Amino acid sequence: MPEIPDLEAIRAFLNERIIGVEVTRAETAIPYIFRTPAKDVAAGLTGNRFGEVLRRGKFLLFTLADEYVLVINPMLSGRFQYVRPGTKKRAKTCLLLALDNGWELRYADERLMGKIYYAHIDDVPHVPQFSEMGPDALAVSEEEFRARIRKHSGAIKNVLTNLKFVAGIGNAYADEILFEARINPFRRRTSLSDGEVGALYRAIGTTLRRSLPVLREHFREELDYEEWRDHLKVHRKGGEKAGRCPRCGTRITEIAPNQRITSWCRVCQPDAAA
């Protein structure tokens, strides 16, 4: 699932290459993924020019010269490509945009879980989930963070990945943030002390900002997006070939409740507050 560091890297890559570029042809191959009629998306994009690519939470927003916006929520399996024509298409390529600079921008979605909208800039706030999203995880102040977290209960990992709390954190980076903060992912939010809430807030900024340059460098030369997780410290480092905690050397624990992998260190992130 693309999260803030992934989407920021994609955004930076594209902003260096497509601003002012015209779409000469738009193919909407799998209409199911489009929440605006696919034929209207193709018609609106053809002959249009890109402005700046923006991000809100886990959405990428491709602004256009006519004040419309192509809004893409890649969800779990959405993948972007910026490639030369003739490059082999990914399975389930939903959108292909031929550009007047000789490249193609593509969006593929293996599980067809993503969503694509084409909306006037004034209507973007009405795109589903936009009104529900909390502040962006990289922009929320500590004061607002503390006020908002008091409104949520349940396991702290579930709170972190709830877009109504803060936007942009998914499964992988939730594990990393909680490791940074030394908080067990299954702790109840109500069990956290004021100090732990502060540590959690700081861990969000530290973890996400530490990952931004790593991902930007990884996608600096080409964009044929696959999740890049090698730099993470605990997420998916457990399982049968469990890695070691980079702090204490304990084997990383990994389980998959509800088919969502959670990875943590039982020593650095104990079940109860130390």
Image (cartoon, grey):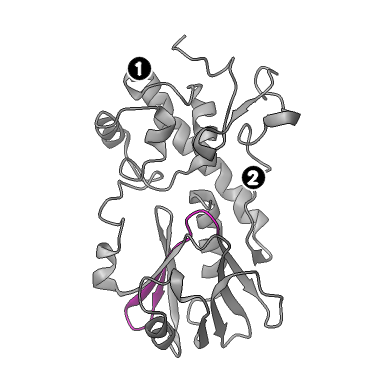
Q: Quadrant of residue 90?
A: bottom right
Q: Residues within 10 Å of mark 1 (few under 14, many from 20)?
A: some
Q: Quadrant of residue 233?
A: top right
Q: Is there a contact, CB below 8 Å, between mark 1 and mark 2? A: no
Disc 1 designates what residue? Answer: 191
The residue that appears at 68% across and 79% down in the rendered structure is 84
The residue that appears at 66% across and 41% down in the rendered structure is 231
The residue that appears at 62% across and 52% down in the rendered structure is 227
Rendered position, 35 above or below 100:
above
Residue sitting nearer the eye, 135 or 273? 273
Q: CA distance from mark 1 to mark 2?
A: 30 Å
Q: Amino acid at mark 1?
A: Ser
Q: Residues within 10 Å of mark 2 (few under 14, many from 20)?
A: some
Q: Amino acid at mark 2?
A: Arg
| Residue 189 painted magenta | no
Residue sitting nearer the eye, 57 or 127? 127
Rendered position, 171 above or below 249:
below
Query: Residue 82 appears at what percent x and percent y?
Result: 62, 72
Query: Residue 3 appears at what percent x and percent y?
Result: 50, 50
Q: Residue furthest top?
A: 274
Residue sitting nearer the eye, 107 or 181? 107
150 horizontally vs 104: left or right: left
Helix, strand, or loop for circle 2?
loop
Query: Residue 68 appears at what percent x and percent y?
Result: 33, 78
Q: Which portion, as a residue range, is magenta?
A: 61-77
| Residue 73 painted magenta | yes
Q: Report the number of numbered marks.
A: 2
Disc 2 designates what residue? Answer: 229
